[in-house]
């Protein structure tokens, strides 16, 4: 998915590729995608692959961060099972006693027999999407510690640090350009590489079956061997790479804004239950959960007007929610105003594929609103599943290991691409610092209008919708023109 060679398979390593091997070859290629894909793949590989390489390295660490967190923070997250758990209200009161100056905003009951309960507070000293959680042993109602948690999955500091490394290299908003550039170009480079690999496989004798796309030709050595493994591994990881690219763009700054606007126009946005009680303001959706990875957080909630009264209602609210189908691990948002209901929403947890939610009136236990995941728009469901997969939470450890393997595969593809680029450099003049040559010029002018016009139109649309692709594509064209002009000047001098 990085840099690939334009020279025929029988070209000697280090030798510059011929412009054409036979007089018929330019005509045969004129109407094909191959020359255009080759040149775009080359430039994008040379200039964009470093960003993708960084994203792959940090992404490999990000993929296994949930498991690392469970090991490093075991003392906060897990306890030894005992008798029946204490009432949820008793656990909350114990946590509130340790943080009397902070506003109680939510509670996440222990999802398993060995898990702790999280009592969550709004802390004005923390950053965006961050809250403070007190972890309580559900069997003794004794706090075992507290920590800052981030996002809807409640990531602890180590996982948050890895998340932000993958997101922006800890450089803040300017650093997000790197990850958006990588995500925006990854699918283009990957699909361009597929076009090139498909043509190369078809050129093999008696190997026109699609299955040969997955098999490297191990009969070759040197650069040819690298090229075959470059293409085969790229095809192996292609489906996951495309999914990661798509979900990465939804979290980006510039393309993400366009994607959000498109989702709103097509009614693909994520729905939420209303916490307004009958007769109150109907425009009161449940508080948005803080985001993960590239998402911003929801609005901070003030403290309940009568905390002890609200805490006493939590047990009833939790039982009613479970009786109404919200049976997975949940976060219960504690309302701050008298005219609001509790919002009970399923959390993003490994192996949980739904996000059912209900709103419950604390005083009576009446369900005032209900939102089943089955009623979400299809695209909202797919987006949620994609985000969970990207975060390594959809299939638990299996999901994380798959992402880790794919990231390692992507790293090897990029490294092999750069090795082939280095081997392409001209060495007959004795130079050791010359760089690999780009594929031949003028392919767009020689392409049939029936293919060139749709391609240019598509490039304009993609460049507008994904701004960093458009800007970098203009930069590639400028570089290409400058190289062409310099070559002509040298040829005439």
Image (cartoon, helix red, strand yellow):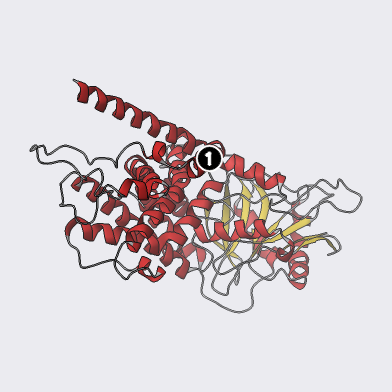
Residue 492 lies left or right of residue 365; in this view the side is left
Q: Is residue 432 above or below residue 412?
A: above
Q: Quadrant of residue 353?
A: bottom right
The quadrant in which the C terminus is found is top left
Q: Quadrant of residue 81?
A: bottom right
Q: Position of residue 292 (x, y in %)?
A: 55, 51
Residue drawn at 66 percent across, 44 percent down: 262
- Return the residue found at the far front: 23
Residue 466 lies left or right of residue 338; in this view the side is left
Local crowd at mark 1 within 10 Å, few (<14), some, or many (≥20)? many
Tag 1, which secondary structure? loop
Residue 54 in sight here = no
Residue drawn at 50 percent across, 68 percent down: 396
Q: Position of residue 420 (x, y in %)?
A: 23, 50
Asked whether 405 or 27 is in front, the reply is 27
Q: Position of residue 68 (x, y in %)?
A: 41, 62
Asked whether 58 or 379 is in front, the reply is 379
Q: Is residue 98 above or below residue 281?
A: below
Asked whether 447 or 46 is in front, the reply is 447
Q: Position of residue 224 (x, y in %)?
A: 22, 58
Q: Is residue 165 above or below residue 383?
A: above
Which residue carries the number 1 mark? 466
Asked whether 95 or 258 is in front, the reply is 258
């Amino acid at each position: 998915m990085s840099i690939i060679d334009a020279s025929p398979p029988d070209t000697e390593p280090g030798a510059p590729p011929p412009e054409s091997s036979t007089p018929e070859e330019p005509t045969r290629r004129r109407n094909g995608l191959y020359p255009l894909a080759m040149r775009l793949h080359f430039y994008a590989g040379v200039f964009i692959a470093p960003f993708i390489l960084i994203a792959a390295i940090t992404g490999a660490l990000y993929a296994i961060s949930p498991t690392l967190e469970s090991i490093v923070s075991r003392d906060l997250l897990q306890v030894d099972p005992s008798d029946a758990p204490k009432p949820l209200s008793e656990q909350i009161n114990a946590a509130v006693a340790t943080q009397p100056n902070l506003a109680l905003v939510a509670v996440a009951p222990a999802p398993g027999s060995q898990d702790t309960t999280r009592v969550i507070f709004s802390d004005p000293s923390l950053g965006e999407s961050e809250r403070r959680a007190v972890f309580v042993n559900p069997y003794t109602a004794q706090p075992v510690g507290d920590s800052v948690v981030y996002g809807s999955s409640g990531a602890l500091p180590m996982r948050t640090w890895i998340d932000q490394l993958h997101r922006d290299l800890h450089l803040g908003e300017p650093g997000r350009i790197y990850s958006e550039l990588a995500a925006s170009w990854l699918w283009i480079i990957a699909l361009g590489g597929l076009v090139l690999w498909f043509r190369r496989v078809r050129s093999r004798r008696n190997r026109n079956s699609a299955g040969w796309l997955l098999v490297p030709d191990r009969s070759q050595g040197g650069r040819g061997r690298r090229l075959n493994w470059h293409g085969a591994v790229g095809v192996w990881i292609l489906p996951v790479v495309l999914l990661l690219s798509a979900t990465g763009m939804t979290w980006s700054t510039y393309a993400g804004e366009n994607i959000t606007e498109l989702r709103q126009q097509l009614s693909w946005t994520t729905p939420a239950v209303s916490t307004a009680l009958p007769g109150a303001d109907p425009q009161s959706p449940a508080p948005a959960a803080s985001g993960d990875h590239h998402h911003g957080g929801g609005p901070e909630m003030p403290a309940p007007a009568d905390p002890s009264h609200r805490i006493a209602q939590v047990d009833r609210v939790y039982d009613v929610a479970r009786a109404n189908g919200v049976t997975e691990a949940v976060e219960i948002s504690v309302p701050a105003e008298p005219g609001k209901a509790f919002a009970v929403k399923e959390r993003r947890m490994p192996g949980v594929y739904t996000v059912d939610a209900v709103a419950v009136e604390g005083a009576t236990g009446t369900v005032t609103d209900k939102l089943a995941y089955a009623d979400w728009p299809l695209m909202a469901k797919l987006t949620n599943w994609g985000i969970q997969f990207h975060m390594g939470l959809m299939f638990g450890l299996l999901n994380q290991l798959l992402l880790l393997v794919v990231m390692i595969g992507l790293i090897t593809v990029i490294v092999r691409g750069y090795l082939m680029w280095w081997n392409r450099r001209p060495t007959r003049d004795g130079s050791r610092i010359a760089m690999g040559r780009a594929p031949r010029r003028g392919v767009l002018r020689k392409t049939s209008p029936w293919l060139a016009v749709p391609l240019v139109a598509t490039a304009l649309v993609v460049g507008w919708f994904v701004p960093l692709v458009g800007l970098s594509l203009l930069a590639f064209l400028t570089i290409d023109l400058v190289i062409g002009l310099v070559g002509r000047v040298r040829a005439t001098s």
